Structure formats: C-alpha cells, structure tokens
C-alpha cells in the first residue's frame, strides 16, 4: 500500500466522507431508494460512529481523504453481529491495497468491540468489493439480516470473527 494513512474519522472529515459516498454510490447505480446514500448519517459520520461499539476510519493520502469505512451494531440484529458500513473509495484509492488494509482495521475494531460476526450488504455489479469481501473470509447469505432499510441491496455476506 503506497503512502496512505488509515485513521479514525474526525469531525472535520464529515464533508469529505459525505462527498465520497455521494460520488461513489451513483457510479455503481446505488443512488435510488433503499440505498445507504440516503441515510441521515451521511452528513455527520463522525457523530454517527462516536456511539458505543462503533468505529469509522478514513483513508488519507497527502492530507486528502480518499475513502472510508466502518462498523456498528447491526440495526435490528443480534447483539453479537456488527455491520460493515459505508466502505467506499474514490478511484485514486482503488487498486493500491487501501481496501484490504481498511477492511482489516474494521474487522480488528469489530473483534475489539466484542462482536462474533460481521454482516454486510452490497449490490450486484460491485464486483471488486465482493472479491475483497471473499478474500477476507466473508461468505454469501441468501437473505438480508437485521433491519438496515437498504432494501435495494441484493447481495449479503457474513463473516465469523
């Protein structure tokens, strides 16, 4: 991984992270109803992940935030299940190992917070992301878990931590 820093989100990162989410999701057709792009937390990610058993990290290069991702308890799920949430990268952060490094940081945080499983939802067409998930040991589920409200997602994964 070339000269990138992965660090916890700070309040000043909120505009950059919102920009990334709102830029990347439409690139993959994930901008309609039922996608995370419409979640209220998009504009205040720092506050949303300052809650117990939650963590959000940003990928930064030369002082510029290029991506991010985090974990939080799965809404409507079992207490031992977290969700990998809002992990997106601008094109300049792709293919340099940032996704794998960020994934590892998120999974380490999930274990540190006492979760036994990590769930995620994604979309057909996000092939590079799905490949990353599989490389980290995630397996597919036939149906969604919890109650995220992301009814337009059509791919579901789980990992035993």
Image (cartoon, grey):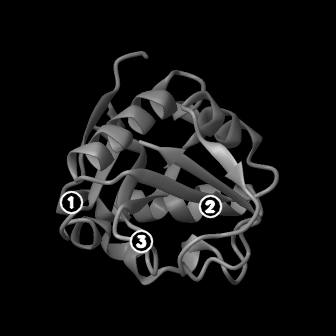
Q: Is residue 64 above or below residue 30?
A: above
Say whether residue 109 is left or right of residue 38: left
Of helix, strand and loop, which one carries label 3? loop
Tell me the quarter of the picture where residue 15 sits: bottom left
Q: Which residue is mark 3?
A: 78
Q: Which residue is mark 1?
A: 12
Dot 2 alpha-carbon crowd within 10 angstroms: few under 14, some 14 to 19, many 20 or more: many
For label 1, the crowd category at 10 Å Cα-Cα, with few meaning under 14, some 14 to 19 and many 20 or more, is: few
Q: Residue at x 40, y 36 (%)?
A: 102
Badge 2 element: strand
The answer to which of marks 1 and 2 sits earlier in the sequence is: 1
- Which residue, given by chain and number where applicable, does mark 2 sit on? 121
Q: Secondary structure at mark 1?
A: helix
Measured Cα–Cα span from mark 1 to mark 2:
27 Å
- Determine whether, in the image, residue 84 is placed left or right of residue 30: left
Q: CA distance from mark 3 to mark 2?
A: 16 Å
């Amino acid at each position: 991984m070339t000269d990138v820093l992965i660090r916890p989100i700070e309040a000043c990162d909120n505009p950059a992270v919102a920009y990334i989410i709102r830029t990347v999701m439409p690139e993959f057709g994930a901008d309609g109803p039922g996608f995370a792009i419409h979640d209220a937390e998009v504009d205040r990610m720092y506050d949303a992940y300052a809650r117990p058993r939650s963590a959000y990290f940003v990928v930064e290069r030369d002082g510029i935030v290029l991506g991010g991702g985090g974990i939080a308890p799965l809404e409507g799920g079992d207490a031992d299940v977290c969700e990998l949430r809002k992990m997106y990268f601008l094109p300049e952060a792709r293919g340099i190992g940032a996704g794998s490094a960020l994934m590892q940081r998120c999974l380490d945080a999930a274990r540190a917070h006492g979760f036994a499983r990590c769930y995620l939802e994604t979309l057909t067409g996000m092939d590079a992301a799905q490949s990353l998930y599989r490389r980290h040991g995630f397996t597919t589920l036939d149906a969604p878990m919890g109650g995220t409200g992301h009814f337009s997602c059509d791919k579901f994964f789980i990992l035993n931590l």
